[in-house]
Image: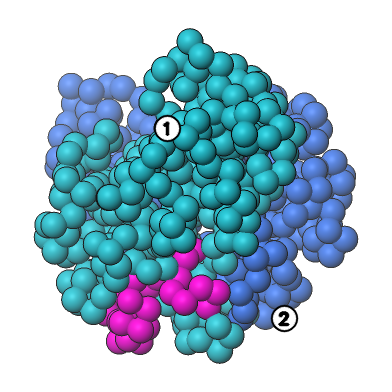
Chain colours: A cyan, B blue
Amino acid sequence: MTVPQVYVGPVAEPAAVEAVRRGGGEVVASPREATAIAWLDWRPEHRPALVAALHPGIAWVQLPTAGIESWLADGVIDDARTWTNASHAFAPAVAEHALALTLAGCRRLAQAARARTWDEAIQGTTLRGATVAVVGAGAIGRALIAMLAPLGAEAIAVTRRGRPVDGARETVAAGALASVWPRADVVVLCAPATAQTRRLVGAEALAAMRDHAWLVNVGRGALVDTDALVRALDAGRIAGAALDVVDPEPLPDGHPLWTHPRALLTPHVASPRAVEAATLAELIGENVARLAAGREPLGVIDPARGY
Amino acid sequence: MTVPQVYVGPVAEPAAVEAVRRGGGEVVASPREATAIAWLDWRPEHRPALVAALHPGIAWVQLPTAGIESWLADGVIDDARTWTNASHAFAPAVAEHALALTLAGCRRLAQAARARTWDEAIQGTTLRGATVAVVGAGAIGRALIAMLAPLGAEAIAVTRRGRPVDGARETVAAGALASVWPRADVVVLCAPATAQTRRLVGAEALAAMRDHAWLVNVGRGALVDTDALVRALDAGRIAGAALDVVDPEPLPDGHPLWTHPRALLTPHVASPRAVEAATLAELIGENVARLAAGREPLGVIDPARGY
């Protein structure tokens, strides 16, 4: 058992420092002395400092975000060491937001929030007996599937390879997604943004979805063709869309989705800031402990796969 | 085992007729031949017909609503036979709506639905680690408690007598409610309307609640002092209120709750009409089967208790 020497940067936030120690690591003041880095800042302008801190002795880097496509695009992530994303930290909160948006859609809560008169025609539907397609069954998708069970909803998990997912009625490989659209009452996107998932939901998928279906996106805006979605909503092709992420992001003022009666938007807040530092620190502590014990950390990134 | 002879009124809806037969009962064309009545219509104007149909041979009447205070007030319910409410039929859907409103509150979805610009200050909180007071732990409250578990929220159940409730961290007797208000992050009302529960949440309770707390009501509007609630919301005394039932109901146009930034209203639709007939029929079938087997039906009303 080796004691990980962890540099916490760009600023040594107390929660993360404490988590490293709780996990059995030592916190070092300079990357030069480090065997691992816990990087807490998602902003691109800080990334050159991370790249400069890397050296052959750094065996592991924890990144602070669930989606890591921009770190790949920026050339931060290399093949010389293990990199981990923060999906496991944010999964419970993001899955909860996905459930909130799913229920808000089915229960017509956006329409209710905008109403100014008692209108019993604002009738929702129940998730009981509904089929929810969970597209992307990583940490977030799996957490969501567990939340759906006591509601009596059944999940179809969609994963890259279609390997069975705990709690899902069935799992479908991404290549067979066309067979899923017509069977889902709700489609929840919690997949990473990669070349393969870009505009996964476009005109074709929207045309194949059930007319009472809701589309929920807590993954990445790029998964959806926004213009095609607006056309589908205008035509009443699907019941509605509840989106925490959108393309472009931020959505510009005056965009038709802001006022669309079938749309509900939240501003990329599925993981509330109030709990983010604490949950990220929790993951850092867990991964330091895994590293110290010679086990694989949670959220290992495969650069070739893109997430 | 006696075969219940069931009159289905005021109109013999096919789903209910089929359910009686599935439950092992026989459907009779006139109340005179009946030993039981399944009453499908909630409207007051039909109640004299129900009262006229009663005779000493009627051992059981199934009512079509969860809340039965108006049937008591109308003098429909007597002590001469077993009466059952429909709580068990609507519990899953109403609990799901309570969860939808709870999540919508914590996640600031009403504010998001009204936004016209990307505003990351619309930050919610998570239910993970939160304490949810479930006031009234009948069929609805119990269903809700089961739904909260995978979200990592803990429930304090409040019941008349404080007897332990499955899945709740603790159960508190209604008489000790004052100790609950300051400990709850969310208060969900799913209690019946009785003389004891009338305006349970008034100025005092609202003053005792945490300033980040949400009040959710899927029980009865009469449980809340609406004027006191509006004052508490105006003062930012609590974070917000998400209400499916309200006093007065329907809420008149122009009422301050319609446009209050801390309020979200749904028009008494927790049990969606689209599924109501089917779920009521399911309960009728179950209760006919219980009656045929000499077992107690679900949802027995205690007129003295008031629910």
Quadrant in the picture for residue A293: top left
> Is label 2 on the same chain as label 1?
no
Q: Amino acid at mark 1?
A: Leu
Label 1, residues with CA under 10 Å away: few <14, some 14-19, many ≥20: many
Give the magenta part as a residue range: A224-251
* Screen quadrant of the C terminus of chain B: top right
Disc nearest the viewer among 2 and 1? 1
Residue, x 70% and y 64% (percent of image)? B121
State which chain disc 2 sits on: B
SS category of the residue bearing label 2: loop
Quadrant in the picture for residue B285: top left
Residue, x 27% and y 33% (percent of image)? A166
Instruction: Relative to A38, say whether A216 is above or below.
Output: below
Q: Is residue B200 magenta?
A: no
Position of residue A199 in the picture relative to residue B243 (left or right)? left
Q: Position of residue A185 (x, y in %)?
A: 27, 60
Q: Position of residue A49 (x, y in %)?
A: 62, 51
- Label 2–label 1 contact, CB within 8 A: no
Check residue B254 in the rendering and tell me which mark sits there, or answer none: 2
Viewer-proximal residue among A126 and A194:
A194
User: Could you tell me if residue A24 is visible in this image?
Assistant: yes
The residue to which callout 1 is attached is A298
State which chain disc 1 sits on: A
Distance from the alpha carbon under mark 2 to that under mark 1: 53 Å
Check residue A275 in the rendering and tell me which mark sits there, or answer none: none
